[in-house]
């Protein structure tokens, strides 16, 4: 059976840059879209042979605003992926969109070329809050975009929201959530606002603008977990909730440590045991793909011990959590000190154990950076250990006839 692979393509074009955004994206560079498409198709053609033993089961076009790239370019891009890679028939193909950049015609065109999941950046149901973020759409446009997606027969719709906005209190956040639940999406991503260094929002905060404090954000988060559960949305990652069967298969690759290949400036990959990223420069990316030269910004071969750290760091972001047997089998490292620490967290209500699996609780998710950091310190000080005899016996494959 072919290995499963995800593909991420970064589309760095935006109509305008939001005040909180620190992703690599550019406004006013539409003049380079055609050249960028050429570069992407060349890069995809050159990279595909490296993944000839893999079947691609997720494709994610992120940004930026991929819907601004235009349906003809997106169709050509997806066609290039379908031509060069072994794309599974049931592949999840996601395109990120902003409400002001889609209509029924565009979404129908995307669906015809294989797109079956739309991620729509709504962020808030309050126009004043949207303006405070530098968003250029209104909530009325967001509702119209959802209606357009349904008219285009998009049956897997994810909506992004942000809490902890300037001037927002719990009641205002609750109104946003209730308004969005009325739109009946299959998936919701709810992120706490993070002030990234060097962004316009960062400069506003430095000048004295007030944001909800950590306690207020925590109250919003815990209310959200409870409210969405009652509405039928299962939490499967710190910030992500879905109706049964609608978890983001692509994003789960990141959290479960599965391989993926990225294309475009600033895109990251984890493939062939190596993690690497490309230069965050649109013009350099185009010129070096089409004219020759290195695209790589950073690259490293990941040792097994570091993979063990990633297992803890990424899996504990999910409600699936971690399990002793998985950890010992994959990394041949001692789980006992980690379990002792998790038992401490369980006493505080930050972690829970179900059968042999450990996961953080919603209260633990609020402290996840600190808790996971402590677990990584415990792991670093622990010595590699052999599997217990019981697990060693289970790990030996049964001898087959004629073997």
Image (cartoon, rainbow, N blue to C red):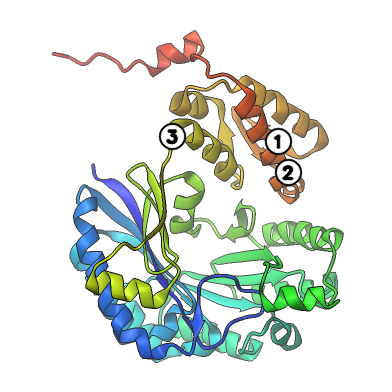
Q: Position of residue 261 (x, y in %)?
A: 35, 56
Is disc 3 placed on a helix, strand or loop? loop
Q: Quadrant of residue 171?
A: bottom right
First in residue order: circle 3 vs circle 2: 3
Quadrant location of the C terminus?
A: top left
Is disc 1 placed on a helix, strand or loop? helix
Q: Is residue 322 above or below residue 217?
A: above
- Nearer to me, 295 or 25: 295
In the visual, does 160 lie left or right of 156? right
Task: Say whether marks 1 and 2 touch (CB < 8 Å).
Answer: yes
Mark 3 to mark 2: distance in Å?
Answer: 24 Å
Q: Which residue is mark 3?
A: 303
Quadrant location of the N terminus?
A: top left
Q: Which residue is mark 2?
A: 370
Mark 1 to mark 2: distance in Å?
Answer: 6 Å
Q: Position of residue 356 (x, y in %)?
A: 59, 27
């Amino acid at each position: 059976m072919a290995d499963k692979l995800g593909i991420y393509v970064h589309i760095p074009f935006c109509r305008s840059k939001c005040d909180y955004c620190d992703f690599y994206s550019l406004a006013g560079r539409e003049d380079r879209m055609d050249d960028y498409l050429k570069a992407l198709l060349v890069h995809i053609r050159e990279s595909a042979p490296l993944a000839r033993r893999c079947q691609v089961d997720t494709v994610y076009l992120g940004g930026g605003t991929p819907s601004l790239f235009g349906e003809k370019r997106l169709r050509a891009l997806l066609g290039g992926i379908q031509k060069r890679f072994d794309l599974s028939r049931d592949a999840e193909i996601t395109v990120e969109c902003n409400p002001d950049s889609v209509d029924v015609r565009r979404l129908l065109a995307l669906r015809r070329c294989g797109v079956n999941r739309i991620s729509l950046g709504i962020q808030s149901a309050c126009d004043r809050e949207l303006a405070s973020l530098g968003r250029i759409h209104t909530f009325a446009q967001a509702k119209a975009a959802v209606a357009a997606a349904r008219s285009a027969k998009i049956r897997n719709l994810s909506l992004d929201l942000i809490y902890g906005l300037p001037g927002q209190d719990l009641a205002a956040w609750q109104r946003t959530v209730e308004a969005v639940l009325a739109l009946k999406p299959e998936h919701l991503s709810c992120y706490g606002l993070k002030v990234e260094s060097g962004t316009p929002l960062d400069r506003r905060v430095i000048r004295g603008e007030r944001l909800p404090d950590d306690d207020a954000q925590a109250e919003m988060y815990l209310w959200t977990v409870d409210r969405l559960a009652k509405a039928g949305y299962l939490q499967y990652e710190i910030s992500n909730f879905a109706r049964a069967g609608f978890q983001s298969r692509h994003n789960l690759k990141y959290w479960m440590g599965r391989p993926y290949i990225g294309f475009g400036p600033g895109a990251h990959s984890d493939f062939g045991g190596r993690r690497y990223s490309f230069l965050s420069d649109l013009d350099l990316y185009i010129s070096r793909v089409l004219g020759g030269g290195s695209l790589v910004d950073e690259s490293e071969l990941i040792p097994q011990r570091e993979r063990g750290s990633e297992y803890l760091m990424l899996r504990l972001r999910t409600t699936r959590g971690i399990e002793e047997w998985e950890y010992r089998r994959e990394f041949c490292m001692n789980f006992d000190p980690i379990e002792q620490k998790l038992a401490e967290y369980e006493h505080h209500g930050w972690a829970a154990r179900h059968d042999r699996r450990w996961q953080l609780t919603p209260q633990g998710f609020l402290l996840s950076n600190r808790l996971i950091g402590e677990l990584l310190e415990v792991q670093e000080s622990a010595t590699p250990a052999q599997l217990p005899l019981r697990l060693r016996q289970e790990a030996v494959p049964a001898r087959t006839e004629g073997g």
